[in-house]
Image: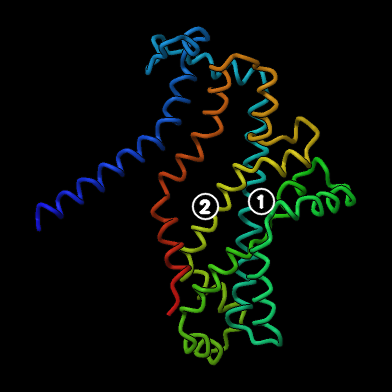
Amino acid sequence: MNQKNNFRVAIKYFLLVIFAIITVFPFYWMISSSLKSGFEVIQTPPTMLPENVMWSNYSTAFSMAPFGRYFINTIIVTVLSIVSTVVISILSAFAFSHLEFKGRDLIFSIFIASMMIPGEVLIVNNFKTISNLGMIDTYTSLFIPYAASVLYIYMLREFFLTVPKPLYYAAKIDGAGDWKFLWKVLVPIAKPSIITISILVGINSWNAFLWPLLVTNNENMRVLATGLTAFQSDAGNQYELLMAASSIITVPIVGVYVFLHKKIMNGISLGGTKG
């Protein structure tokens, strides 16, 4: 029996190692290629490590495109997206979990049903609205259509429902209004879920491509993802520069996820547990 269990454990870990290699190797190859010379990056057979480390590829990529501006734009849009999504999710989740009003459950059911609508279906309508409002090439256009998320409202609502109702009633008796109870009691308790939502929103905003591509025509308003696409035409077949630019975009957000993945998993598990 023990041998059988040991064999299963060995197979499990073997598969995990294989999947880990498959997942990590593209990132390794991207970074390795970004440090190679133009000849070495296309030579056959390929080399796993650069023979001569070419840190200059990064400075060359920066000089060929305004990646500094793209970084600033991406950070601004990411921060705006996080703040707006978190605030709207907190207020909406509190309304659907603790406030009593007519049609509350029906409205929430409609919200949940809307999650079945693919986001791509809404892009044309959102673009027409943004265009008619004259918001093309603005920071507002880059984040406002996604300032609210039903998924995150649902996550926070489920967490708020785990807070005992007597605590809410006791706060009301002590003179605390709904607003004070929300920000002084619920929000501190829900901190793990709020941190998780902030991280997920930040990652999605950082990686956003299609929507920023539609609403930005000015080079100075591009974010990193769309800036990289434009950079491809400038770099041409200089793959080492393309890999350097890709590393500039990818490494920061991957590092954030690796560093905070435990908080993400913890927040998701708490937000999805009721009772």
Q: How is the image coloured?
A: rainbow
The outermost residue toward the left is: 2
In the rendered view of the protein, which quadrant contains the N terminus?
bottom left
Q: Which quadrant holds the C terminus?
A: bottom left
- The answer to whether the residue labelled 1 contacts the one labelled 2, judged by CB atoms less than 8 Å apart, is no
- The amino acid on which the numbered mark 1 sits, given as a three-letter code, is Leu
Residue 61 percent coordinates (x, y): 60, 19
Q: Secondary structure at mark 1?
A: helix
Question: Circle 2 is placed at which residue position?
Answer: 199
Q: Is residue 32 above or below residue 137?
A: above
Q: Percent position (x, y) of residue 46?
A: 42, 14
Q: Which percent across, then down, holds residue 36? A: 46, 13
Q: Residue at x 77, y 48 (%)?
A: 141
Q: Is residue 14 left or right of residue 76?
A: left
Residue drawn at x 66%, y 44% is: 76
Residue under circle 1?
80
Tag 2's secondary structure? helix
Q: Residue at left 88%, top 47%?
A: 134
Could you tell me the amino acid type at mark 2? Ile
Q: Earlier in the sequence, mark 1 or mark 2?
A: 1
Question: Few, some or many C-alpha atoms within 10 Å of disc 1 (few <14, some 14-19, many ≥20)?
Answer: many
Q: Position of residue 65 (x, y in %)?
A: 67, 22
Image point (90%, 51%), residue name: 132
Mark 2: give few (<14), some (14-19) or many (20+) Cα within 10 Å: many
Residue at the top extreme? 39
Could you tell whether 185 is left or right of 62 in the image?
Answer: left
Estimate the spatial distance between the alpha carbons at disc 1 and disc 2, rounded to whole Å: 13 Å
Question: Which quarter of the figure has residue 146?
Answer: bottom right
